[in-house]
Image (spheres, helix red, strand yellow):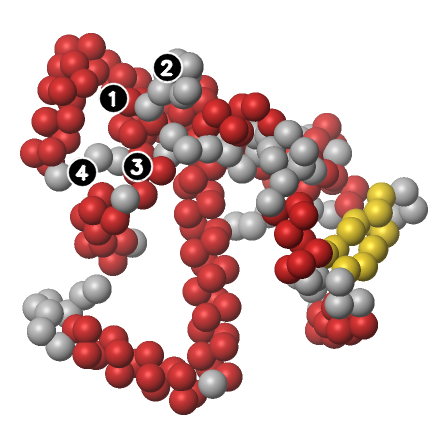
Amino acid sequence: APPTEEGVKKLIQLVTTYAQGFKLWLGPTFPLLTLCHPDTAQAITSASAADAPKDMLFYGFLKPWMGDGLLLSAGNKWSRHHHMPTPAFHFNILKLYVAIFNKSVNIMHQILLHSDFLYYLTPDGRRFRRACRLVHDLTDAVIQERRRSLPTQGTDGFLKDKAKSKTLDFVDVLLLSKDEDWRELSDEDIRAEADTFMFGGHDTTASGLSWILYHLSRHPEYQERCRQEVRELLKDCEPMEI
């Protein structure tokens, strides 16, 4: 369930009291270590993929949906794949999607349903698996359609066709990518990365915007400065869209 006001106050108190970090217990056997200070967290965030394995107690719930993509993969696989999607996020590619952006559930688990076996027996669990199949089928269909067009057009023809439509999307970039051993990504790998970024793209953006809006509401003087900056940027735009 969402944290209560009392729970938030307790968390703030813990962070204030233990500035470097503290340990909580989930039940009698599982310790949860929370690092608060950036100096404390740096050892983890700057560690290599091999030295900082990912915890699956919570992230494991996402594996049926997103597969072994960048969010959930670790070690050598993460190291080989993590740089491949970078070209898809170049500014010149992203800005072409702004008009699309302008047009455009979390399922809460009770402790009893932590077990996949029990969860999948419930109506919510069956609905989750149907939703996963729907997402995977859609992603697979896009990948297969794009992959079929590559042999007939070749890479150059494929890129020229994309240049005409002025879009080169995430799946296109992954289809054309190769790792350091010049191996192409499998369809399963591409699906995992596409589903991972579909999730990460909405979740981090929503969290970041919520945090920004919260602080702007608490500091109206900065809110007004932001408003004036936006008006200045848009004063010669027709129509007025960012």
| First of labels 4, 2 by sequence position | 4
Label 3 is placed on what type of residue?
Pro
Structural distance between the alpha carbons of marks 4 and 2: 25 Å
Residue 159 located left or right of residue 117: left
Q: Are marks 3 and 1 in contact (CB under 8 Å)?
A: no
Residue under numbered circle 3: 87
Image point (57%, 23%), residue name? 76
Structural distance between the alpha carbons of marks 4 and 1: 13 Å
Label 1 is placed on what type of residue?
Arg
Image point (67%, 48%), residue name? 43
**Circle on res. 167:** 4
**Is label 3 or label 1 in front?**
3
Q: Can residue 215 be seen at all in this image of the molecule?
A: yes
Whether 28 is drawn above or below 151: the answer is below
Q: Are marks 3 and 4 in contact (CB under 8 Å)?
A: no
Q: Are marks 1 and 2 in contact (CB under 8 Å)?
A: no
**Is label 4 or label 1 in front?**
4
Structural distance between the alpha carbons of marks 3 and 2: 17 Å
Structural distance between the alpha carbons of marks 3 and 1: 18 Å
| First of labels 3, 2 by sequence position | 3
Crowding around mark 4 (Cα neighbors within 10 Å: few <14, some 14 to 19, many 20+) is: some
Q: Give x and y (percent) for residue 137.
A: 40, 25
| First of labels 3, 1 by sequence position | 3
Tell me where residue 171 sits by quadrant: top left
Residue under numbered circle 1: 146
Crowding around mark 3 (Cα neighbors within 10 Å: few <14, some 14 to 19, many 20+) is: some
Residue under numbered circle 2: 182
Q: Are marks 4 and 2 in contact (CB under 8 Å)?
A: no
